[in-house]
Image: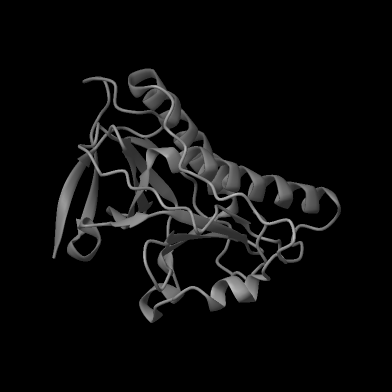
C-alpha cells in the first residue's frame, strides 16, 4: 500500500501558490526514511552509487544505497546547493560536525577494508534507482526524497535524513565525483575505468535531533542513459 504526497513544482523550492502540485506516491516501506551520518560516492560507467551510512554504534552499516544516472547528478547537486543557501538565509550557516584529526602515521584503508568494516544488508545490496529528488529542510536536518519519475506516477524510492552540518561535506563529495568523471572523460573515451570514491568521514557522528521539515523543493531530472551495473571503486576522503 502507498500514500500520496503533494509535492511542489519541479526545478525550484516551493515559493507560493504559483507552483502547480506534483504528486508522488510514498510506499509504506519508504515513508519512515532512515538517518545517515556519512556517505560514500562511487562512480560506475553510467551511474553514480551513493551509499548513505549509519556510523552510530557498531556495526557501522550502509543504511541506503541510491543509484543515480550520470546526467542526473549535476542537477541533484544544484538542487541540494540551492536548499543549503535557503537554509543559511533562514537559520545561518549549519554547524559542522566534529572531525577527528587524521593520524599521519596511519595507513589509509583500502576500499575493500572500508567495506569489510561496514555491514551491507542483502536488501540494500542492489540499491534503489532515482532519476529525481525532492529536498526539504528543518532547523537541524535535511530530508532527501529520491524519486523514480516514470509514467504514469512518480514514486519515492528512498527517503534519507541528513544532519544539516553534514550537507556541505556531502556536496563536496558529490562535486568531487563529478569532477573526477569529467577529467577522465576529457582524457579520452566515454566509458572510463572505475573511479576512487569520494567519501565523507564514515566515523563522523552528529547528535543533532530531527526537527519539523520546511516545504520541499524538487529538481527535475532527465531519464538515464543506461543501467549498466556499477563496478566498485576505492574511496578518497
Q: Check the image and report above or below for 29 versus 97.
A: below
Q: In the drawing, does residue 97 fall left or right of residue 10?
A: right
| Residue 15: percent from left, percent from top | 29, 21
In the orientation shown, which residue stands out farthest toward the bottom? 122
Q: Residue at x 55, y 78 (%)?
A: 116
Q: Residue at x 27, y 25 (%)?
A: 19
Q: Residue at x 74, y 61 (%)?
A: 105
Q: Check the image and report above or below for 131 versus 192.
A: above
Q: Check the image and report above or below for 198 versus 118.
A: above
Q: Check the image and report above or below for 165 versus 58.
A: above
Is residue 124 something one can see in this rendering? yes
| Residue 1: percent from left, percent from top | 13, 65
Occupied quadrant, residue 85? top left
Occupied quadrant, residue 47? bottom right
Q: How many marks?
A: 0
Colour scheme in use: one colour
Q: In the drawing, does residue 8 fall left or right of residue 233?
A: left
Q: Nearer the viewer, residue 13 or 98?
A: 98
Is residue 229 something one can see in this rendering? no
| Residue 100: percent from left, percent from top | 55, 50
Q: Residue at x 37, y 61 (%)?
A: 56
| Residue 37: percent from left, percent from top | 41, 54
Amino acid at each position: 500500500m502507498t500514500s500520496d504526497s503533494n509535492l511542489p513544482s519541479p526545478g525550484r523550492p516551493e515559493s507560493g501558490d504559483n507552483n502547480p502540485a506534483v504528486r508522488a506516491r510514498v510506499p509504506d516501506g519508504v515513508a519512515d526514511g532512515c538517518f545517515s551520518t556519512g556517505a560514500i560516492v562511487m562512480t560506475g560507467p553510467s551511474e553514480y552509487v551513493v551509499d548513505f551510512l549509519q556510523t552510530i554504534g557498531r556495526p557501522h552499516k550502509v543504511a541506503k544505497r541510491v543509484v543515480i544516472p550520470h546526467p542526473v547528478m549535476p542537477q541533484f547537486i544544484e538542487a541540494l546547493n540551492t536548499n543549503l543557501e535557503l537554509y543559511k538565509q533562514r537559520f545561518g550557516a549549519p554547524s559542522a560536525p566534529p572531525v577527528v584529526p587524521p593520524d599521519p602515521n596511519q595507513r589509509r584503508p583500502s576500499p575493500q577494508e572500508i567495506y569489510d568494516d561496514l555491514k551491507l544488508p542483502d536488501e540494500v545490496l542492489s540499491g534503489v534507482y532515482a532519476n529525481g529528488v525532492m529536498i526539504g529542510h528543518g532547523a537541524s536536518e535535511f530530508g532527501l526524497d529520491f524519486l523514480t519519475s516514470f509514467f504514469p506516477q512518480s514514486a519515492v524510492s528512498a527517503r534519507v535524513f541528513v544532519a544539516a552540518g553534514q550537507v556541505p561535506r556531502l556536496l563536496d563529495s558529490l562535486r568531487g565525483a563529478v569532477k573526477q568523471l569529467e577529467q577522465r572523460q576529457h582524457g579520452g573515451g566515454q566509458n572510463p575505468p572505475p573511479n576512487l570514491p569520494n567519501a565523507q568521514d564514515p566515523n563522523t557522528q552528529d547528535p543533532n535531533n530531527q526537527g519539523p521539515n520546511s516545504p520541499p523543493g524538487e529538481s527535475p531530472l532527465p531519464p538515464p542513459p543506461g543501467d549498466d551495473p556499477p563496478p566498485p571503486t576505492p574511496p578518497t576522503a
